[in-house]
Image (cartoon, rainbow, N blue to C red):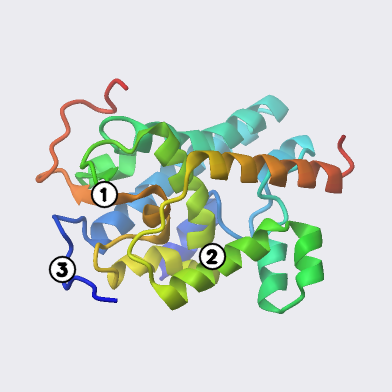
Amino acid sequence: MTTPAAPSGPRASFGERFLAWIIDVIVVGAATGVLSRVGILGGLVGFVVSYGYYVYLEGSPSGQTVGKRAMSIRVVGMQTGYTIGYGGAFIRVIGKIVSGIACALGYLWMLWDPEKQTWHDKFADSVVVPVSSYPVSEWPGKA
Amino acid sequence: MLLVALVRPMIPLQSGVLCPLRAVTGIPCPMCGMTTSVIATTHFDFGGAFAANPAGILAVATACYLLVRRPLRLRVSLPMVSVALAAMWLFELNRYGIN
């Protein structure tokens, strides 16, 4: 199998994605932490928020969570260069389970992948790109 | 590394964290048992893995495929994921005696 030496387009760096991930973890962790103290209903809402946050924001036209917006990067379709949609974002968030196996190897995969894709990127056929190359008109944007 | 250790416990969808849905409501989510299943699979305890959550075996198999074959693309369809999650949830609800 022949693999290209460089990605087919601009890609976000590992450092940018890592920092965006930390910001999102803090945002989601804080939200679910507060909600879980409210009771059963809060816990249920927190559970939905912990997944819905990524599905809604990464599936939106901007493809940006709070962390990705802070780092000026976004998720787009590998083939389209446009939003992956809520369905794609759902696949992506569920795919993170597989990426988390074996010391998060699926997350680190982007370090040597020709297209700089994590495993959950491959499942959703997505890439993470810099906003400087793929501008965002509105955040999160209307579907 | 210290920063990672600090924030990692707050991450959803990671191993080693009690499911927030089950913790608050007692109702398991489709991913409950995945940690146990994945660990059991990596120890070749397929019976234990299946009993916890059959999807753990599939997840490890997928990870092995990605590691060995290193495909450039591996697109997964939404219906496939939806059906798998529904099946996993039914399995977990039955496992915890919630029918």
**Residue at x 66%, y 76% (from the top left corner):** B42
Q: Which mark is residue A37?
A: none
What whole-number distance in Å separates the C-alpha atoms at marks 2 and 3?
A: 25 Å
Q: Name the residue that disc number 2 marks.
A: B62
Secondary structure beneath label 1: loop
Q: Amino acid at mark 3?
A: Ala
Instruction: Compare residues B68 and A119 and report the one nearer the observer.
Output: B68
The answer to whether dots 2 and 1 both sit on one chain is no
Q: Which residue is mark 1?
A: A78
Report the quarter where the C terminus of chain A lies. Answer: top left
Discs 2 and 3 share one subunit: no
Image position, residue B10 (x, y; %): 52, 51
Q: Chain of mark 3?
A: A
Residue receiving disc 3: A6
Taking A113 as reference, is A46 above or below it? above
For marks 1 and 3, the one nearer the N-term is 3
A3 sits to left or right of B35:
left
Q: Residue at x 42, y 74 (%)?
A: B69
Label 3: element kind = loop
- Residue found at the far front of this picture: A1
